[in-house]
Structure formats: structure tokens, C-alpha cells
Amino acid sequence: MDLDVFIAAHRAEWERLDALLRTPGRRRGGHEVDELVQLYRRTAGHLSLIQSSAPDPALISRLTTLVARARSEVVGTRRSSWRDAVRFFTVAFPAACYRTRRWWVPTAVVCVLLSAVVGWWIADSEEIRASIAAPETLREMTRPGGEYETYYSSSPATAFSAQVWTNNAQAAAMCLAFGALLGLPVLWVLLQNTLNLGVGVGLMGSADRLDVFLGLILPHGLLELTAVFLAAGAGLRLGWTVIDPGPRPRAAALAEEGRATLGMAIGLAAVLLVSGVIEGFVTPSGLPTWGRIAIGAVAELLFLVYVFVIGRRAALAGDTGDLERADREAAAPVAA
């Protein structure tokens, strides 16, 4: 193909398309809209022909930009709205949480039981406690007014809530982001959190102050640990998708599960914000222990209803936590 002749033959069409794109849409008449669509289709064909027959970098770049602008004008661009945020928190996020229940619920049960076992082991063994810290240090940590109690009131409530929220959100994001690495980093994060909880239970139990420890940890810990377990379960599910994508192509399966997992990171950040507020304002407050625990229990119950009622309904309706069907790229059918 003679490129110079081709350019001379079609330059007027390209310039006309560029002129139409410079005209605001509200000022175009019906005939101009039809002309815009026709020129867009013809220019796209020209670009394809040049790319295959006479690849000229400068011309390809020019036409690619022109076609992209025209496509955006013809097809339209989708803009995010409040409707998307409402749909996310009422449909997509609870559906994603419900779909991963077979991963995070067993994870929660195993980690809580392991923490209890570690706590009993530490409380029952003076040698194990001695390997953690000197007896004087442990007494200072567990005594009335010691480190375990003053930790929650060591900073102003607002700053403490922000710090706790940031740390927990980072831990949840690590579980979600590193799940694609076969879930191995997720197991490490879970192990650290489980051992930390078990050590606290064991040390305070050995000092006969387990009731105080539970009164401090339960108000915010119920919702906080649920969010962490949910993030870990979602990360493990993503890791398993790498191994077994099911009937879907591996790339398509990872794309679908990865988008849903990314959305869960946003939703869990909101959940952890609530637990951070409880930890900063309720846990160190002067409320009686039963009152503080009741607030945490109500928050946990509401979240479980949110997941297992609203999320179940959305999942049964076919939502997976992924983007809306209109926003996804087309996928070829696969055999089951």
C-alpha cells in the first residue's frame, strides 16, 4: 500500500472527524451525530489497515488518539456516582463477604481455639512465661494499672482510633493483597495475630486477671477480629483460585476474584473504622464492663446480620462482589 496516497485520500475524513469532536455534543444536530458515528467506524478501519499493511508510528499514534476520542464520544464514558457507593455497601460487599464464608468462618474458629490453647499453655507453665520476659516485667504488665490496662488510654481517643484503624486496615490489606501468593503470607499474618492474642490471654490469666483482659479486648475485638479473619479468608480463597480456578480460565478467574477482593479491602476498611472508634472511645471509657462488652456485641451482631442476611440475599440473586456486568469485559463461554 502506498501510504502517501492513502493519507491524501482520507486526510479530509480524519480532519472532519477531529472537527466534529471539537464541537460540544449539545450543539450537534442529528445529521452531525450520524456523520460522527460513520467517520469513527471508517477511521477505525483505516487504523487497522495501516497497522497491518504499512505501520507508520507517527500516523498510527495520531489515528489511535483520534479513534479513542471518537469512541469515548460515541460509546460514552461511565462516571461513578453515589448509586455505585450505595450498591457497593448494600449488595457487592455483603455478597462478597457471604461468598467467602466457607473460608473465613473456619479460619476464625481455628484461630480462636489456637489462641485459647496458647493462652492455657502460657498460664499453666511458669517456664514458658519466663521465656517471654522476666517475672518483674510480667508483673508490671499485668498488675492493676499496668501496660495491658493503660494501653487503651495511652493517647487521646481520636488519635488512638486513627492509629488503630490504620494498623488494622494495613493488616487486612496485606491479607487481601498477598493472597495471590498461594495464601502463604496470609497464614503468617494469622499466626502472628493468633499468638499475640494467646499471649495476652495467658499472661493475664496467670495473674488471675483474665476477666479484666476480656473486658478490655471484647468490646472492639469481636468486630476487629471478624474483619481480620474475613480478610484472611478472602486472601486464602484468592490463593486457592491460583491453584484451582475451576471451569473458568485461570486469568479470568483471578481477574474476577481479584476485583471482588479489592472491593472487600474498601469495605473492610469501613468495618475496621467502626472497631477503631469503639477501641478508642468505648474500651477505655468509664462504662461498666458489661456495658462496654454489650456495645461490642451489638456491633458484631449487626455486622453478622449484614453479611448473612443482606449478603446471602445478594449472593442468591447472583452477585459475586465483582463489578456490574455492564462494566466487565465480555468473557467467552467455557465448558462446565
Image: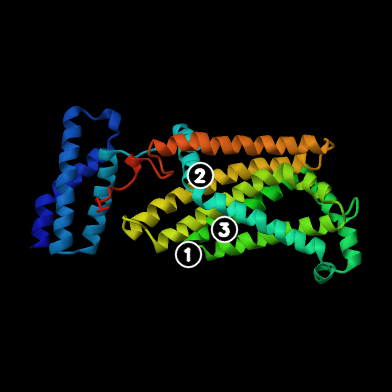
**Front tag of 3 and 1:** 1
Amino acid under label 3? Met
* Image marks 3 and 1: residues in contact by CB distance under 8 Å: no
Using residue 294 as the reference point, say whether residue 273 is left or right of it.
left
Amino acid under label 2? Cys
Could you say which is closer to the camera, residue 223 or residue 207? Answer: 207
Helix, strand or loop at mark 1: loop
Residue 174 is marked as 3
- Percent x, y of residue 38: 15, 40
- Percent x, y of residue 171: 61, 56
Seen at 27% across and 47% down, the residue is: 330
Seen at 24% across and 30% down, the residue is: 28
- Percent x, y of residue 22: 28, 39
Crowd band around label 1 with a 10 angstrom C-alpha radius: few (<14), some (14–19), many (20+): some
Label 1 or label 2, whichever comes before in sequence order = 2
Helix, strand or loop at mark 2: helix
Which residue is tagged 2? 97
Which residue is tagged 1? 182
- The CA distance from mark 3 to mark 2 is 17 Å
Crowd band around label 2 with a 10 angstrom C-alpha radius: few (<14), some (14–19), many (20+): many
Using residue 305 as the reference point, say whether residue 292 is left or right of it.
right
Quadrant housing residue 61: bottom left
Quadrant of the frame with the N terminus: bottom left
- The CA distance from mark 1 to mark 2 is 20 Å
Label 3 or label 1, whichever comes before in sequence order = 3
